[in-house]
Image (cartoon, coloured by chain):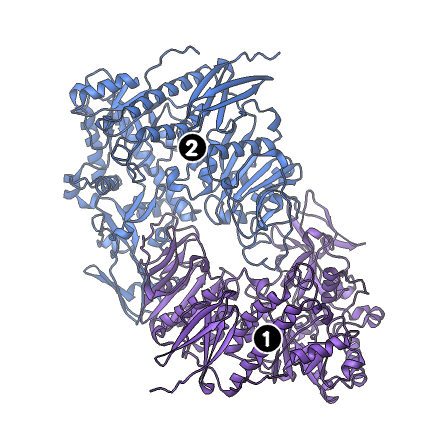
Chain colours: A purple, B blue
Amino acid sequence: MENKRLTGDFTLPGESGYENLTLELAERWGADVIRDSDGTKLSDAIVKAGYGIYSTICIIREHNAFALEHPETQQQVFLCSDPVTAMDTTLQIRPLEGYFEEQFELNTSWEAMVYWQVYDRTSNHEVPRGNWEYADGLVTVKDCIPYHEYTVSFLCWRIWEEINMYNHTTNNWTSEHLRQLDPRHPLAWDYLCRYLEDWCKANPDTTVVRFTSLFYNFVWIFGSDMRRRNRFTDWGSYDFTVSPAALKAFEKAYGYALTAEDFIHQRKLQVTHMPPTKAKRDYMDFIQAFVAEKAQKLVEIVHRYRKKAYVFYDDSWVGMEPYGRRFASIGFDGLIKCIFSGFECRLCAGVDVPVHEIRLHPYLFPVGLGGLPTFSEGGHPEKDAQLYWRNARRALLRQPVDRIGLGGYLHLTQGYPAFVDTIEKIAGEFRHIKELHREGAPYTVPVHVAVLHTWGSLRSWTLSGHFHETDRHVLIHINEALSGLPVKVSFLSFQDVEEKGLEGVDVVINAGRAGDAWSGGDAWKGDRLVERLTKFVAQGGSFIGVNEPSAVEGYHTFFRMAHVLGVDLDTGARVCHGRWSFETSKRGGIPFEPAMLGNKDHLYLTDGKADVLYGCGDSPQFTVHDFGQGKGVYLSGFTFSPEAARMLAELIYYVTGKQKDVPVLTAEPGTEATYFPASHVVYFVNNTDRPLSTSVSLHGKTVRADLEPFGAQEVQVDDSVC
Amino acid sequence: MENKRLTGDFTLPGESGYENLTLELAERWGADVIRDSDGTKLSDAIVKAGYGIYSTICIIREHNAFALEHPETQQQVFLCSDPVTAMDTTLQIRPLEGYFEEQFELNTSWEAMVYWQVYDRTSNHEVPRGNWEYADGLVTVKDCIPYHEYTVSFLCWRIWEEINMYNHTTNNWTSEHLRQLDPRHPLAWDYLCRYLEDWCKANPDTTVVRFTSLFYNFVWIFGSDMRRRNRFTDWGSYDFTVSPAALKAFEKAYGYALTAEDFIHQRKLQVTHMPPTKAKRDYMDFIQAFVAEKAQKLVEIVHRYRKKAYVFYDDSWVGMEPYGRRFASIGFDGLIKCIFSGFECRLCAGVDVPVHEIRLHPYLFPVGLGGLPTFSEGGHPEKDAQLYWRNARRALLRQPVDRIGLGGYLHLTQGYPAFVDTIEKIAGEFRHIKELHREGAPYTVPVHVAVLHTWGSLRSWTLSGHFHETDRHVLIHINEALSGLPVKVSFLSFQDVEEKGLEGVDVVINAGRAGDAWSGGDAWKGDRLVERLTKFVAQGGSFIGVNEPSAVEGYHTFFRMAHVLGVDLDTGARVCHGRWSFETSKRGGIPFEPAMLGNKDHLYLTDGKADVLYGCGDSPQFTVHDFGQGKGVYLSGFTFSPEAARMLAELIYYVTGKQKDVPVLTAEPGTEATYFPASHVVYFVNNTDRPLSTSVSLHGKTVRADLEPFGAQEVQVDDSVC
């Protein structure tokens, strides 16, 4: 590939009042598109400068006048009061006690009240409706059982759109609180369609309508007490989609009625990290159908005005899952995903949509999502940008996206020249990588790794939210490592395996905590699943279990795949059973550090035959166990780092017998190499902040590179096989 | 109390061939009784020296000739084969594969085979009897489901008495392997009664028959592989009591039949640390009745020969629980308990029997129970003795026993003069403490602490076995701490609380791992239990929960007492729920070190109102929560040390409002003081290996003591209240 300066494929956030800066950075970074951001508007000087223009629309908000006129069109949610212990036979509960009253307002309408429920949480029984009454913000319960705990589940209005609420409370905004409309309400829907029509007419220069995003936000429930401002955050929750109208429509479509308890679920709510009930699965399907139908109508309007419709996959995305079976039917022209990590790039790149764009971080804001300074005192935005790009780059080397971009307030970059330089360099590396892909696909080791969990392909790559929001879950560390490895990766649900088996799969990974959606919980009660996986390994496949894989109570082992793994966890019943002693083995020569693994108690060898690569006391932490023609591998934990990704790579190559002939294994574990045969290029990256020299052995020839900290280097190779 | 030299109350292990040593040490240590030990016999020179004579009888062994002549009278056990995965539709299992064949022999008699079971462990179904057959040590299973796991549960003879087996394998004994008889077999029972009669006649000098012990040993299952020699050890297991005859008698008495699976229990067996099934509870009752009935007959024989009958509460004790409702009916004259710890002293001291004796450690053996040297190179028996006495002394200051003693080979003390000195000093301290108790009871803080678990008073003080055998369980650390505190302690079962409430109790402690017998598992599904305890705290009691107290799945909180504790544990469903932030509080001024507590993840504050005395990250580890008139206290763990016992003491005084007026709280936490009002004595002990000065404030006067390492000091006080 010629080393020309490539431009384009870059979306720049413009800012009115900073026209010169906008056009200067557009030139510097090679932008071809200028966008507005949440809270910004583009001036004519920018709009008319000849760039493509993305205009952000958050379709369900910015309609406060309408919302106040028709408050019944606002969105709702089921909440549950904090529990109150009955000290006598009557008690009073103020349902909204402890909730942020700027976000919620009780819905005491007749049609909402029929969904309210009072529960005895000690006995798990609903209190008969005749035993409680509501008045003046208080529920009074009579005939209580003394010393039992009671709660009230109730519907309420959400009177502050949550992204706006977040920006207000984080960035001290003082503007009017924005409300949000529920498109399920016919009045609201008609209004929104008209609004979009009018908007398209009024914005002829806009080339792309950037939906940020559709109708229902992921869930943020705020508390009144600053010691627990965040009561609940779930990037995959469907709780904000509910309303009496939705519940009635569901009942009609599915033949059974949902109750508040289907959502409240013993005050736990149904989080994305746990296996859903059947009712929740049905409800998700119901909402997805609704979202797809309505979104399709909006896209039609946009297309009618000869604009493209892109969607930002964050914020009000719920029901629009890009890997859901209805996404393509919406007809979006592009998907934009904001990213910190490699797995998010793969998530974006793999979607069936014409244009894939990633929005890089840091966002041009004074503080970052984690609350630390970026473009303010103490911040190092160039270092942040470099680190996120380090994560993204290895994923983009596996699978490209079409565009990159930034978001936020452009003026904040003033005084951060190192950041401007870094973005320029990143844009250059991005375009080169994209160009290499255009010339031909990178070399892939012929290994198919399937990640196995409850959600399967619907939640490909992500668990829900960003890495730092889900980093207590081991699977996100695994996914992040996999995002840059030269292997085929797919995401299977337990149902997929039960119904279709594992044809073509070489390695199955199951990684999670007992009972969660990632480990699988009750799904492991299915004998068919265990049979399929056992057969798969017996016939030569490998099963890698991490933390508490295949764990479920009720069987002779806690890990249902213990016979394959050679390792199990004692939940207490085996405390008197002797343990196999073990010596540490160097089998496979897989490089690892204990810090990459867990330090987990109560683990034991089942048949004593597993090789223990690492153990803590009498508890094995990393094992390889032969089973039939295949292997079971147990890892007590896995913490992502570039070196841990390398460990996982070598482990995968070892168990699949590929360890000896992978041409892209670098001599230096802090570096990675991607081989593009059509371009005759090995593309080296340095994943560390140290200068590193490295090499790969390609067709018997050594290809070397000397890399700057976080640097990349393209090396032309004579790769003709002798 | 006069400071005279007291003697007596000391049982010395005599040794033939070392007559002079025996009599010299008897004089030095003030012994009034000489005993034989396992593997030793006393010579006439010793027996006739004017001392009381204890003679050890292990009633069910030393009868190899009879056992070989009547092999059907030997004891049995249910075992389960290791699981085998079916790779096809047939498979073969060798049941005894992996078991120690010197311990077990298949029982393939017709009456035994009807109890054998083949299980599909993948589907949890028993394989129909027509689908398997046994021949030549092998079970062949047909019509298997490929990739399912199968096991064989079977009866086998135990052909090596386990204490003898332990001594052989630990101490390299080479004598004939001793067998053991099952007194349930009529032939064996008649033989044993005749044997005891003959023995009494032949041993006229014996004053006390020391049963070591009765019929059924605690369970040791050995494996064939030295990497897992110990397959199973449970000091409270009933597995060694089983036989076809016992199963038939059970069925007749209880109206339902037990199967192998009632014992094998998904290969987990039913360990003492887990809540029993109803079948196991019934079976324990059944065995206890049998043991009491037969033991009573043996005691009658002994009494007929004008000897006393003492029983050693270790080894073959199963079914004889000293806190069981039938123990007193046996008619023993004394109970002997070997001890390392304070809780074992309290266990012994509290039994309803005329004489209580503790056998001190170390045992006079080359190596100790933990496998470390004692009376051999590298051993420091005097240090061991001092440490165990440190533990015992604080318990004996609360509740005395009548006698102390040693066991083993006396000649081993030669060359260990420091040990001889230490025992002399210990004997002196013991007699002084006993004398103080004789003069009047020690001062007790008016607080009643109830330890709440599955077994209640049946397993008072002990969990099963010694401290070092159960130290992974937090409750033994609690019990050890309580054993020396000046408060009333009792042990209640969940059933006790449900049926009788908590009248007179001030503090309830529940300490264990979720699902185990000490935490309680499914017992917490009882609403009545939760009501009783909630009322108890609401009305002023305190509930101290340790590790995973009151934990059970299925409710809105994992800890059923979370509303009282103000703390709960998230098992996964609450991973998206926000946590209350907290500042650390110094409430109560309770002294502690983090090392005394746990470091547990996933804990959260329920209502945010608990005072957090210590937290790790966002996970509270030590909290105090007001509830009604009382308090809930959470400790994530508790590791025994004298200082940790002091922490628990102060915690108990704080929650019961007694903190300000406890006269026995020493100025130095490494020391303890016991006040004997009738003797006008404060007895100080130093629990550390450092010299310490300390004091207490008694009726406004300061009483001081300067203590040697591990030392004790009796201080006469003028305790007249002005």
Number of marks present in the image shown = 2
Q: Disc 1 is attached to a residue of which chain?
A: A
Image coords of residue B110 (percent x, y): 23, 55
Q: Which mark is residue A245?
A: none
Left or right: B440 in relation to A247: left
- Crowd tier of the residue under label 2, counting other residues whose Cα lies within 10 Å: few below 14, some 14–19, many 20 or above: many
Residue type, label 1:
Lys
| Badges 2 and 1, same chain | no
Quadrant of the snapshot with the C terminus of chain A? bottom left
Q: Could you tell me which secondary element the residue under label 1 belongs to?
A: helix
Is A268 left or right of A579, judged from the image as shown?
A: right
The residue tagged 2 is B343
Dot in front, 2 or 1: 1
Instruction: Look at the picture and state if B113 lies above or below B452.
Output: below
Where is residue A333? Give x, y as percent.
65, 84
Check contact, mark 2 vs mark 1: CB within 8 A: no
| Subunit ID for the residue under disc 2 | B
Compare residues B219 and B624 and report the one nearer the observer: B624
Residue B331 visible in image: no
Rate crowding at label 1 as few (under 14), some (14 to 19) or many (20 or more) other CA atoms within 10 Å: some
Three-letter amino acid code at disc 2?
Answer: Phe
User: Is the residue A152 above or below the residue A383 in the image?
Assistant: above
Q: Position of residue B171 (x, y in %)?
A: 22, 39
Q: Position of residue B313 (x, y in %)?
A: 33, 33
Choose between A428 and A498: the one closer to the eye: A428
**Structural distance between the alpha carbons of marks 2 and 1:** 70 Å
Q: Name which quarter of the figure residue B364 lies in.
A: top left
User: Looking at the image, which is closer to me, B203 or B400?
Assistant: B400
| Label placed on residue A425 | 1
Task: Determine whether the residue tagged by mark 2 lies in a helix, strand or loop.
Answer: helix
